[in-house]
Image (cartoon, rainbow, N blue to C red):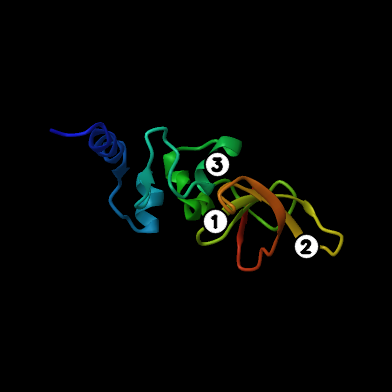
Amino acid sequence: MFGLRTIVIALGFLSITVCLPLDRASAHQTGSWSRHAYAAHGRPARWCGWWMRTQKGGGPELNLASNWRYWGRPSGPQVGAVVVWSHHVGMITGRTADGGWIVRSGNDGGRVRERPRSVAGAVFRI
């Protein structure tokens, strides 16, 4: 009746859950996170926050990049600081010869990457 391909496709859909959307303040207070699809292995579809958790620890609410703005304490740009943009998070690992910042982050072009990035408009936490 159903082919193997149909069953495999159906099982693929069953391994994904979606959380209800919350505003940022609620997500911070309740420990919940905004709408993200999660694969069976636990890594979100947008995984820069999840990758940062592998580096710094923290709960699943930190899978959402913007929630990193509540982690730790405020700082300025410096090596070791977590840098948080509205939809991405990374860690400052160095400086370029011309004074720019080198950032390592997950899900940067679909992989973990370290490269010079503008930190204009970002929040820094240590």
Q: Secondary structure at mark 3?
A: helix
**What x and y, as percent, mark residue 122?**
61, 63
Whole-number angstrom distance, CA of label 3 to CA of label 1: 11 Å
Q: Residue furthest left?
A: 1
Residue type, label 3: Trp
Circle on res. 88: 1
Sequence order check, earlier mark of 3 and 2:
3
Residue type, label 2: Gly
Position of 77 relative to 19 (above/below): below
Q: Is residue 16 left or right of residue 102?
A: left
Sequence order check, earlier mark of 1 and 2:
1
Residue at 68% in and 65% down: 118
Residue type, label 1: His
Q: Nearer the viewer, residue 57 or 17?
A: 17
> Residue 54 occupies which quadrant of the picture?
top right
Q: Residues within 10 Å of mark 2 (few under 14, many from 20)?
A: few
Whole-number angstrom distance, CA of label 1 to CA of label 2: 18 Å
> Residue 31 occupies which quadrant of the picture?
top left
- Residue holding disc 3: 51
Whole-number angstrom distance, CA of label 3 to CA of label 2: 23 Å
Circle on res. 80: none
**What x and y, as percent, mark residue 68?**
52, 50
C-beta proximity under 8 Å, tags 3 and 2:
no
Q: Residue furthest bottom?
A: 121
Q: Residues within 10 Å of mark 3 (few under 14, many from 20)?
A: many
- Residue holding disc 2: 100
